[in-house]
Image (cartoon, rainbow, N blue to C red):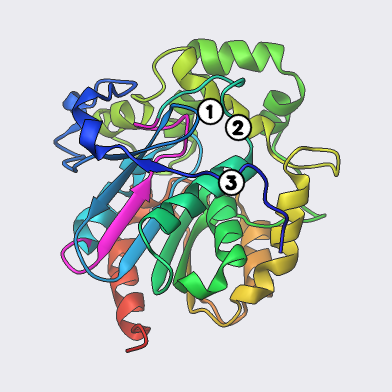
Amino acid sequence: MMNRTGLTRFEPADAVADKITPPFDIAPHRRLYPFASHWLKAPGCFYYHYLDEGQGAPVVAVHGNPTWSFYYREIVKALSPFYRVIVPDHVGCGLSSRPTDEAFDYTVESHVNNLEALLDHLGLNSNVTLIVHDWGGMIGMACAARRPERIARIIILNTGAFLIPAEKTLPWQLSFIRHFPAIPALLVRGFNAFSYFATFLGVAKTMSGEVRDALTAPYDSWGNRIATLRFVQDIPVYPEDKSYALVKWTDEHLHLLNHIPMMICWGMRDFVFDKIILAEWQKRFPEAEVHTFPQGGHYILEDEGEAIVVLIKDFLKKHPLPG
């Protein structure tokens, strides 16, 4: 197993939840996001936010960059009458704290450790249905590969969890941010370029202003945008990159999840997680149930959410948990 360093040990924070100041004003977005907030306190004196709605078998949904738990709002609404739906905000995202670089290591391993610590804290040791998107794929699948016995079903939404295939070129927009830090830092952290333009480039259909405002709301200042930049800078391309070893380990251990029922829902108009990445998933998991959406973009739940909710419900019924 991968040698894990800096493992997180969370402490309950709900007893002081009324004293926690969220990093942005959530009130204008409650109509679309009508959920109770929960926090855990990490040793570095920052708070890890998550949703915990409904009862029953656990469904854990892991978001990417630059989204937050809001992205899964319709999944939470649709599944929480039947399941316990848990959706964390990665540190630096959504309603979680924004520690400095000195207080938190913004690498994929740190995010994986946080997710694993949340599952441990909640006692979710089996029968977990995992839903992943964007960076959530790498984070969620690394966590799953560490403890395959936790996971009962997997749902993949435009994401990756392996080293970049040889035939895939990193899009120039991401490469520019990753390799030339000064100008991207000004654009991403100074003007919210990444989060804002993702609400246009990440969809194939028109996104409402209300949804766009909610998706970008957590990233309203230089300090609040630290994770959106660090996620891109952490994309592992070369062996000397910080997160390369963990991504390589996950790449080599995905086979431990071959026995788990998997469904893939894929927006074909995603210029980052494109048909090359989809083909890699299918090569590794040939038994997976696959649904492609020709008019779906990277934010597949924004473009095709209603259809995907139906598919998820059907998939969960087709693969009941062991009794």
Image: magenta residue range: 80-96
Q: Is residue 196 left or right of residue 309?
A: right
Above or below: residue 217 compared with residue 301:
above
Instruction: Name the quadrant containing residue 284.
Output: bottom right
Instruction: Name the quadrant containing residue 253.
Output: bottom right
Asked if the residue at tag 2 contacts the one at tag 1, i.e. Cβ–Cβ closer than 8 Å, the answer is yes
Label 1 element class: helix
Whether residue 267 is visible, yes or no, is no
> What x and y, as percent, mark residue 156?
49, 62
Q: Nearer the viewer, residue 78 or 302?
A: 78
**Residue bearing mark 3:** 7
Q: Is residue 73 left or right of residue 47?
A: left
Residue depth check, mark 3 versus mark 2: number of the one nearer the observer: 3
> What x and y, as percent, mark residue 315?
36, 77
**Residue bearing mark 1:** 227
Rendered residue at 33%/49% (across/down) = 72
Amino acid under disc 2 = Tyr
Above or below: residue 3 compared with residue 92:
below
**Residue bearing mark 2:** 106
**Label 3 neighbour load within 10 Å: few <14, some 14-19, many 20+:** few
> What x and y, as percent, mark residue 199?
42, 32
**Quarter of the image that includes the C terminus:** bottom left
Amino acid under disc 1 = Ala
Instruction: Name the quadrant containing residue 59.
Output: bottom left
Label 3 element class: loop
Rendered residue at 56%/49% (across/down) = 112
Amino acid under disc 3 = Leu
Rendered residue at 42%/73% (across/down) = 126
